[in-house]
Amino acid sequence: MEAVPQVRFQVVAECSHTRARAGLLHTPHGTVETPVFMPVGTQATVKGLTQRDLDREVGARILLANTYHLYLRPGHELIRQLGGLHRFMGWPHAILTDSGGFQVYSLSGLRKITEEGVLFRSHLNGDAHRFTPESTVDVQLALGSDILMALDECPEYPVSREYARQSMERTVRWAAAAFRHYAELERRDGGAPRGELFPIVQGSTFPDLRRECALRLAELDAGGYAIGGLSVGEPRPLSLEMVEACEPLLPAGRPRYAMGVGMPEELPEYVARGIDMMDCVLPSRNARNGCLFTRTGRVIIKQSRYRDDPRPLDEECACHTCRNYSRAYLRHLFQAGEILYSVLATLHNLRRYADIMRQLREAILGGTFPECLAALHSEPPEAA
Ligand SMILES: [Zn+2]
């Protein structure tokens, strides 16, 4: 029996001057409007927010969760026993999980990459583990993700061209192995409903390697494609250039996901280059560290000029934080180290990101995306 695709992407409008497009990503847990920014819920929680706030206040319809962390703790088998990640964390909408590869490379000091996969030690207790292209599919299926990522190697920046090529070729072989395994499971289960597997384009900062990787992964005819290895320390214009190199070679009717980007001012740049999905810890992490994003620029809340500032963080923001609290109150909470500060700040930053994405989507639908792009460029970096 042929498996019915559970994830389907529909392009509903395209900008005639840039590569930007607006779409609908249909998943087993609802439809996501694109372009979309996905909040990061590393440990099956977006730090500081309840799922209710993410749903109602931020309007999130898809979250990212980290396979590496959930595999180590509490363990994917436990989550499977408890009905999968959606039920476990009480999140009714879509979930995308990464392959775990990126965390292995960034968190685990001891690791060894072989043709079969990657051996690593847990950053929690030093236990030895192995991820293979097949095992990371199994872990993500146990979690019940709507969108799964194929295991890739994310090389650090910079690397030699020779290493970047070897690593890219390994990523292509691993992706093929993950897809074979996934197809085999599908045949075995008679096409039981499951999420969609995306391969990841790598190739470091070499445009020709990026293009070759995209072409070879396109042969997999995947339901969507990710572009990885961005925001690993390379200059930001180079990240955009890598997207420009590979994006035209990816199937037009499939969603493209730029992993780990970006700053608020970068979101429109990625959208203009044909990106439909993004994720980053930046809005939530910066919120906790006291950096808030507003329509009139950045607010560093600890600054003394906010001590007696009665204005909301962002006069035009409709989030719970901006509707109810002043900059002075937020600064007080921050200075006092109160938990509520993190809650209110994270809520605002994620809402700001969601608002930017909605604004971009509406502009694409209304045919005014180039004007919107120009207007977002002229926003000052620091709020008055
Ligand atoms: Zn707000």
Image (tube, rainbow, N blue to C red):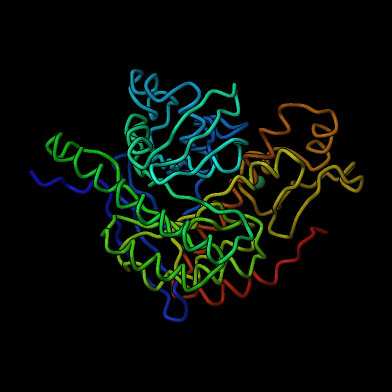
For residue 217, above or below residue 324: below
Q: As drawn, which residue projects farthest toward the right?
A: 304
Q: As drawn, which residue projects farthest toward the left?
A: 1
Residue drawn 83% across the image and 59% down it = 384
Q: Quadrant of residue 111?
A: top right
For residue 212, above or below residue 326: below
Q: Quadrant of the N terminus?
A: top left
Locate residue 321, reporting x and y percent.
Answer: 67, 39
Depth check: give the residue in front, 41 or 103.
103
Residue drawn 25% across the image and 39% down it = 194
Locate residue 219, reporting x and y percent.
Answer: 27, 63
Depth check: give the residue in front, 362 or 224.
224
Residue drawn 49% across the image and 37% down it = 66
Q: How many marks?
A: 0
Locate residue 250, reporting x and y percent.
Answer: 36, 67
Q: As drawn, is 17 to the left or to the right of 124?
A: left
Residue drawn 40% across the image and 69% down it = 212
For residue 382, above or below residue 292: below
Q: Quadrant of residue 142?
A: top left
Locate residue 331, reporting x and y percent.
Answer: 82, 38
Q: As drawn, which residue projects farthest toward the bottom?
A: 17
